[in-house]
Structures are given as structure tokens and as C-alpha cells.
Image (tube, coloured by chain):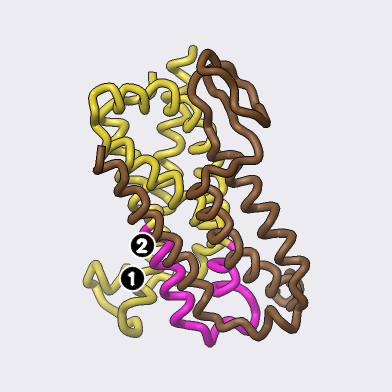
Amino acid sequence: MNNLLISERMISRLIVFSLVFPVIYVVLYYNELALFRFYPLVGELHLNIQPTTFGPAMTYYGWLVIAAIVGAVVAFAVPHRWALRLWAGWSWLVPLGATLFTFIYETRWLLH
Amino acid sequence: MYSMWSTILVVTHGIFAVGLIGALTHQVIALWSTAPTPSDNFFARLRNVRSGSYTNAVVILYLLDFALGAVIYATYRIEVRPYLEDIQFYVAAGSFETKEHLAALGLGLLPAYWLFWKAPGFSAHGNERKYITLLLAFFVWWNFLVGHILNNIRGLP
């Protein structure tokens, strides 16, 4: 059944996406790089930082969109034969590394 | 009206999370324990379920729960986080930041999770399936507990 649903090429793309997404996401939030910001108080999206009268800015959605786009682009750009050579263990080691980094990075809240 | 919708969204978010916790915990127990044997023991029966059958449900529930969380997050950002910062409850605010990141990392992990359970040719990768499922289960448990505790500290208006 699954053989009919997914090709080998699509499998390698999904694996690459799962490897790239956490790396890009971590780089984005660590460097506060967002494609856009959402201002929930006024319910508006902006490409540039707005005055404080707009309320707090949310960068989360911007990180998600960029990580997903970059992940998809890389997944389609990496040649299939390269993707097949990847060690399967990266599929959990990379997200585990991103998770550990996240916990270490967020200890900054304890330093207030 | 505003309050009613917030409540409906938060409760639905929690219900989806409970479904995820149940499915993923079953899978983790099944993967990390020995081969199934017929038994009346509660934990042995937990182990004996066909855990692979939960995979599609986990992916769909995760996506739905994530979408709801992303909607609720905007209200949290203007109603709850400023309160936590005002009372200098930084551990709580920081825990939520971790929750948002783990939710995103889980989203990126979903394709690999699905492949290692369902894709042809992946049945030999038992260790990868084990660690990915454990990681996803940890994300869901952490996010559920942090969300639940934060809602007790200050619920959405």
C-alpha cells in the first residue's frame, strides 16, 4: 500500500527536510532573523520593526515559514544519490542536538 | 464572545494533546520493551497494541494541535506573557519559549517520524524509529505539561 503512495525520491526529500528544518529554525531564532513579524495587538504582519505602539512583535511564525521554505528548497535541490548516502542516525541526532541547544539557550530566562 | 472562543481553543488544544500523548506513549512503550506476550498485566497489554497503526493519527493530530497552538499563541503573547514578566516569573515565561521551540522542532521531525514507521524499506531502522519516537513523545509531554501549568498560573481571558 505504502509503495503506491510514496516514491524513493520523495522519501529522500522528506529525510533531507527533517534534517534541514531544525538547523535553520535554530539559526533563525538564535539570531532573531525573521522574514516578517506579527503584531497580535493590532493583528498586522510587517516586514519591518514597528513602533512600540503596535504592541509586542511575534517572530515565531516568520521563523517557521523560513525554516519550512529553506527545508523544502534544500530537499528538492539535493541530488537523490547524495541523500541516499546520508547516515540514518542523523535523522534523530540532528533534532536531538537542536533540542539540547534550545534548552541550553533558554536558560537565559533563569539569569534575569 | 472573546473569552468563549479562547476557552474552546485551549480545551480543544488540550484534547488533541491528550490524544497525542496516548498514541506516542503507546509507541514508546512498544518500542522500548521486549516482545509482546499474552498477559493480563496492564503494562504488558499496553505493549501488545499494534503501535504502528497510530502513526498517521499522530501526524494528523500533531498538525491540528500545532495549528491550534499557533492561533492561541497570539493571545498568550499579549495577555499572559506580559503578566508573567510583570510578576518576574521568568521560569514560567522561559518554559513557554522552550515549548514553542519544541513544537516547531517536532513539526520538522514529523516527515522522518512518518517515514521510519511507514515507508517501505525502513523496517530495518529500529533504532532510528525508537529515538525519533522518543524525541517526539518528549516534545509532546513537555509541551502538554508546560501548557497545562501555565494555564493554571494564568489562563487566557
Q: CA–CA distance between discs 1 and 2?
A: 6 Å
Determine which of the numbered discs, if any, sits on residue B29 in the image. Answer: 1
Which image quarter: residue A16?
Answer: bottom right
Residue at x 24%, y 31% (from the top left corner):
B89
Q: Position of residue A109 (x, y in %)?
A: 30, 41
Which chain comes out yellow in the rendered image? B
Element marked by disc 2: helix
Which chain is disc 2 placed on? Answer: B
Looking at numbered disc 2 in the image, what kind of residue is underneath it?
A: Thr
Badge 2 local density, few (<14 within 10 Å), some, or many (20+)?
Answer: many
Q: Where in the figure is residue B66, as x and y percent of width and height? A: 52, 44
Q: Which residues are magenta?
A: B111-138
Q: Let me know if residue A88 is in the magenta part.
A: no
Residue at which label 2 appears: B25
Magenta highlight: main SS: helix
Q: Chain of mark 1?
A: B
> Which label belongs to residue A97?
none
Chain A shown in which color?
brown
Confirm or deny contact between disc 1 and disc 2 (CB under 8 A).
Answer: yes
Quarter assignment of residue B86: top left
Q: Secondary structure at mark 1?
A: helix
Q: Quadrant of the C terminus of chain A?
A: top left
Q: Is residue A13 above or below residue A41?
A: below
Asked if marks 1 and 2 fall on the same chain, the answer is yes
| Residue closest to the eye, A13 or B66 | A13
Q: Residues within 10 Å of mark 1 (few under 14, many from 20)?
A: some
Residue A96 locus on image (x, y percent): 42, 66
Q: Given the image, on which type of amino acid does mark 1 rest? A: Ile
Is residue A70 positioned above or below B118 on the image? Answer: above
